[in-house]
Image (cartoon, rainbow, N blue to C red):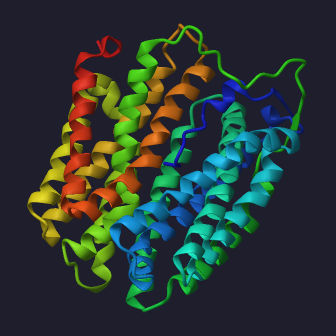
Amino acid sequence: MPLLDYSFLGKIIPQQNHKKSYQKAKQSYLNRMRLAMSFFYFGMGFCFASWASRIPDIKSFLNLSEGELGTILFVLPIGQLSAMPFSGKIVTRFGSRKVLLFALPLYAFSLTNIGLAEEPWQLAFGLYLFGICGNFSNISINTQGVYTEQIFKKAIMGSFHGSWSLAGFFGALAGLVMMAFHLTPYQHFLIVFAIVGVIIFINYRNLAKVKVVKPETFELKPRFGKLDKSLVWLGVIGFCCMASEGIMFDWSGVYFKDIVKAPGALVILGYTSFMITMASGRFLSDILVRKFGAKKILLISGITISVGLYTAVVFPFLIPSTLAFMMVGFGVSNVIPIVYSTTGRISSIPTGEALTIVTGISFLGFLMGPPIIGHIAELTSLRYSFAFIGMFGVFISVLAYYLKIFR
């Protein structure tokens, strides 16, 4: 899944007039539109997964310590946050389609700049630009996804985010192949840029075309006067989940290289195994919740995250750690969809504002988790860092058990 779930934009963005009468469009055309949107999500996820798969190589090339890497990784979400005040307004002003066709190529291009880094400050600057472009891509692609869902008049956003997660697996697999052929990160990222360019060229014509209708009053600022405490606790659950997810993206490769001592290209095995189960779990999440209920799935997911992380800590060997990372992937896959779905059922505050609060708190986990891991590892070791995050799974289960909203 992308770093933030922007499906709430459907509640707060201006209403749109579709340039074409999609209600009369052939089903085959609508299917091409949906497929094109899925490929755009895939392209964005492929960029991020490609960066994550080469973190260990870049860390070694720049001779960074865990603390130094943790500090530099903090720059990426700073770039995303710095773009938030104006990215949404630009998408609203010029339209999600135009911004997406501009932002996604820049996102892929900014990835190649990361591969050119020869000094830590260059890596930090590259990640800052990568974060800014990522925010514009996130806002525009999810806004476009909301419009596409409105045309279909049924829930299809889950399949789009599933495509993003699926790209994580293929991105990790591609990283494995690139390292096996001894390609540098820059050469690897150039190939990714070319692939994303082909995806855009083939599919851009089928993106939904909409015309913005400016409303008389348009206010993005949420009202926090009467804040439901359940929203805060849901945000805390999301925080714990996204912190666990964040360390898998940024530190799984380093863990397999420095702690597990995985040979050669197998250093990416932990990240790959995590992405496989996370992507699979995202597509299965709705089915599991309908059968067993949100509370039971959250309880099991939290325990699964903790057991997986502690297994990797206690048994830092190739096969046990691979299985452990698969457990973590399945655990985190279910939490965020359940949290956001539950948030949408709270009636004390408009859905858009409620999701803004919950996603904001949740995203702090993705923002703070990886740097904290780096600094804990600098003081102790990477195994102790993973053990610290392992407690977050327990917190998820405890909160799911006691919160009234899940009863």
Give the quarter of the image for residue 225.
top right
Which residue is nearer to you in this view: 289 or 318? Answer: 318
In the displayed structure image, the side of residue 356 where residue 132 appears, left or right: right
Looking at the rendering, in which quadrant would you find the C terminus? top left
> Outermost residue toward the front?
379
> Looking at the picture, how far across and down is residue 155, in whole percent?
57, 32
Which residue is nearer to you in this view: 170 or 340? Answer: 340
**Viewer can see residue 389:** yes
Q: How many marks?
A: 0
> Looking at the picture, how far across and down is residue 41, in whole percent?
60, 54
> Outermost residue toward the left?
314
User: In the picture shown, does residue 340 fall above or below 277?
Assistant: above
In the displayed structure image, the side of residue 215 where residue 330 appears, left or right: left
Q: Residue at x 62, y 23 (%)?
A: 352
User: In the picture shown, does residue 405 fall above or below 5?
Assistant: above
User: In the picture shown, does residue 179 fall above or below 345?
Assistant: below
Q: Residue at x 46, y 57 (%)?
A: 166
Q: Residue at x 43, y 28 (%)?
A: 235
Which residue is nearer to you in this view: 83 or 98? Answer: 83
> Looking at the picture, how far across and down is residue 346, in whole percent?
49, 13
Which residue is nearer to you in this view: 269 or 58? Answer: 58
> Looking at the picture, how far across and down is residue 136, in whole percent?
70, 51
Q: Residue at x 41, y 68 (%)?
A: 68
**Viewer can see residue 281:** no
Give the quarter of the image for residue 301.
top left
Give the quarter of the image for residue 285.
top left
